[in-house]
Image (cartoon, rainbow, N blue to C red):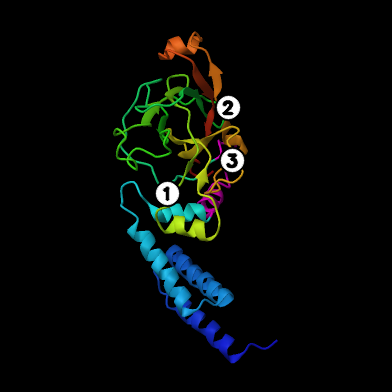
Amino acid sequence: MEATPHAAAEAALTEQVVARFADTPDPRLRALMQGLVRHLHAYVRECEPTEAEWFAAIQFLTDTGKMCDGLVRQEFILLSDTLGVSMLVDAINHRQSTGATETTVFGPFYIAGMPDRSAGENMALTPGTPALVHGRVFSADGTPLRGAVLDIWQTAENGMYSGQDTAQPTGNLRGRYRTDDEGDYAIRTIVPVSYPIPTDGPVGQMLTSTRRHPWRPAHLHFMIDASGHRRLVTHLFNQGDPYLDSDAVFGVKPSLQVAYEERPADHPLARRFGFDGPFREARYDFVLDPVPKAGD
């Protein structure tokens, strides 16, 4: 079927815009910009937004930028997360894993420079169900990784992160732990709770308008670094959480679920880590991918 004059003119416009990027010196930037133009123009041709709808889309993005404060609130990451784009980028960038622990979204609430903590130190400065999360960190060949740094963060029982919630003490439920000579780590904390992502901005309006819920299943964030290995960004999700199958940001993977088992006050781990009553224990071993050597 022959293209109409209008369709031909619209296609010609797309190619004209693509051609304007032909002299971009960086070939990767050139490919990214030309691909963006082609796909964005294809979306417009498929959906045919009215001028008012397109202006509303621009206003939505403008409002999203205004909600980013550069410290804790990053509405664009939240938008990427809720559209599943963050998880798609994550999947594409970890296709070559050699059996390492699975990755998931970074999230918008990480804060750098949180306290260095000793093994088993309590990072919970607010109430909750006491918990011990511990295990080992290995290389893909089974070698324990000494001195691996585990940067951890989670919400308080009110479902908010320190920094996001200014009433919480600085560094609450955040910290940097290190593995010992055997690759062991131990984190004293509280059992994570499920929580809604912020809904007071454009992303919340989008979820409401599309009848989507804003809830994330309970989880603990990890960013793990070890010399000679790829950084691992992942979560540990509470087994049995009601939102595991409908995570608002599509981040759940079955391999990342852990059970928080009840332990009595006289349990050996209670004495070792200073619990003065019953607590929950979760155990998980992480595996990191080595950085490929030159020529691999």
Which label sits in the foreground, 2 or 1?
1
- The answer for how far apart the CA atoms under marks 3 and 2 are is 13 Å
Residue at position x 53%, y 16% in the image: 263
Indicate yes or no whether the magenta region holds residue 266: no
Which portion, as a residue range, is magenta?
84-102
Q: Is residue 116 above or below residue 59?
A: above
Q: Are marks 1 and 3 in contact (CB under 8 Å)?
A: no
Q: Residue 259 carries which label?
A: 2
What residue is rendered at 41% in x and 36% in y? 158
Tag 3 near tag 2, CB within 8 Å? no
Q: Mark 3 points at which residue?
A: 244
Rendered view: 251 above or below 127: below
Taking the image as drawn, is residue 290 in sight? no
Q: Position of residue 145 (x, y in %)?
A: 47, 26
Mark 3 or 2 closer to N-term? 3
Mark 2 is on which residue type? Ala
Quadrant, the C terminus: top right
State the residue in front, 36 or 249.
Answer: 249
Q: In which quarter of the image is residue 169?
A: top left
Q: Is residue 94 magenta?
A: yes
Callout 2: few (<14), some (14-19), or many (20+) C-alpha neighbours within 10 Å?
Answer: some
| Residue at (53% x, 84% y) in the render | 10
The picture places residue 193, in percent across and down from the top left corner, at 48, 34
**Residue type highlighted by circle 3:** Leu
The CA span between labels 1 and 3 is 18 Å
Q: Which is in the foreground here, disc 1 or disc 3?
A: 1
Image height of 174 relative to 185, above or below: below
Mark 3 neighbour class, 10 Å CA radius: few under 14, some 14 to 19, many 20 or more? many
- Provide the residue designation for mark 1: 198
Under circle 1, the secondary element is: loop
The amino acid type of the residue labelled 1 equals: Pro
